[in-house]
Amino acid sequence: MDSGAPYGLISRQRFLSLISSARVSAEAAIDATQIQPASLDLRLGAEAYRLRASFLPGRGGKVRERLQSLAPERLSLEGDGAVLEKGIVYLAPLQESLNLSDRMSGAANPKSSTGRLDIFTRLIVDGSEAFDHVPQGYRGGLWVEICPRSFSIRARKGSKLNQLRLRDRAANQEDVYSFALPDEALRRRHEATPLVDGALKLREGLIVHVGLAGRPGEIVGYRAIKNGNVIDVDRPGFYAAEDFWEPIRARLDGRLILDPEEFYILASREKMRIPSDLAAEMAPIDPAIGEFRVHYAGFFDPGFGQGADGAPSARAVLEVRSRDVPFLLEDGQPVGRLLFEDLAVAADELYGATTSNYQGQGLKLSKHFRDYREG
């Protein structure tokens, strides 16, 4: 599709219309702060269930029926909520539900703060055979699978861990699964108004490179300390970064060896900008680039990185985990691909227009942490 086509991801103003018409509804009224330029933050319901194993309901299956067959342990999320232990899989109903038209489908991903806390979340719906996917015309409730990896967390009813995107499809897009703009379209957009602050590198999307260079001793990344205390997901700015993160400092050779199953926060070398009529998503795993996962919360709303002069101003923060073997990264090495997609209509309010924790960011931990202090 060309930019400006009548089909694509829906933007903020369309979300408001869908809420007004009860196409998107919730147990408690949807708050305006949940509605992002091209996504909707989803809220946990009143309970969660500790699971022995992750699952999908499968074609025709109901999430709650499959859940009950596993005899799960129930946790109340009312009041002060509950601690979700690292390494354990949980399932929780969300407050929001959908009544989509036959041409509308959805996708989900963790929120930025969720990914930076190494919390793995996946949306599940009735009849689903794939995580984070809402089929066309879906009518029903939403569930989220939650697995904290590095830190145990405290969450409660109303906590927001993942977000939903909705997409209007054309009649000939019944079986389309990739909506990424082709490289030639990205090249034209970049020539008109830069998408990145340096040379544009494309390979079925915009190639993102890791930034590991810096002054001697400069912090260029963080590695999670796995014996940290419980983190309350609803307490921004509360925690001392040095209690949870080990700094990674620049080396003369610009190298970093990723240890298997360790969690790292790194940043892209390039600054980037997402135009008002596009959104973007980081491909989380690309075997052609390396055996590591580079992003959990991979969605970028329109307006991300839009500087005052319109120039690219924000680096992508990368949530990195090596999979099976140690893996060597070097400064400037390709680590991911950013896939751009059209909005059906340009967003009427861009990312960072009001309060934003990550607009204009460089290397940055989640909003829960105060700046790292030496000593």
Image (spheres, rainbow, N blue to C red):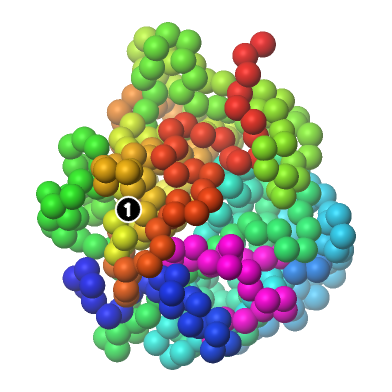
Q: In percent of the image, x 27 and y 43: which residue is there? A: 309
Q: Is residue 217 left or right of residue 52?
A: left
| Residue 64: % across, % down | 74, 78
Q: In percent of the image, x 30 and y 28: which residue is there? A: 332
> Which residue is denoted by mark 1 in the rendering?
274
In the image, is residue 93 above or below residue 276? below
Q: Is residue 336 visible?
A: no
Q: Is residue 198 left or right of residue 242?
A: left
In the image, is residue 330 above or below residue 14? above
Depth check, front residue: 260 or 375: 375
| Residue 62: % across, % down | 67, 82
Q: In percent of the image, x 51 and y 34: which residue is there? A: 364
* Disc 1 packing (10 Å; few <14; some 14–19; many ≥20): many
Q: Is residue 96 left or right of residue 306?
A: right
Q: Is residue 73 magenta?
A: no
Element class at badge 1: loop
Q: Amino acid at mark 1?
A: Ile
In the image, is residue 180 above or below residue 192? below
For the image, the number of numbered tags is 1
Task: Please provide the residue range marked out in magenta.
Answer: 23-44
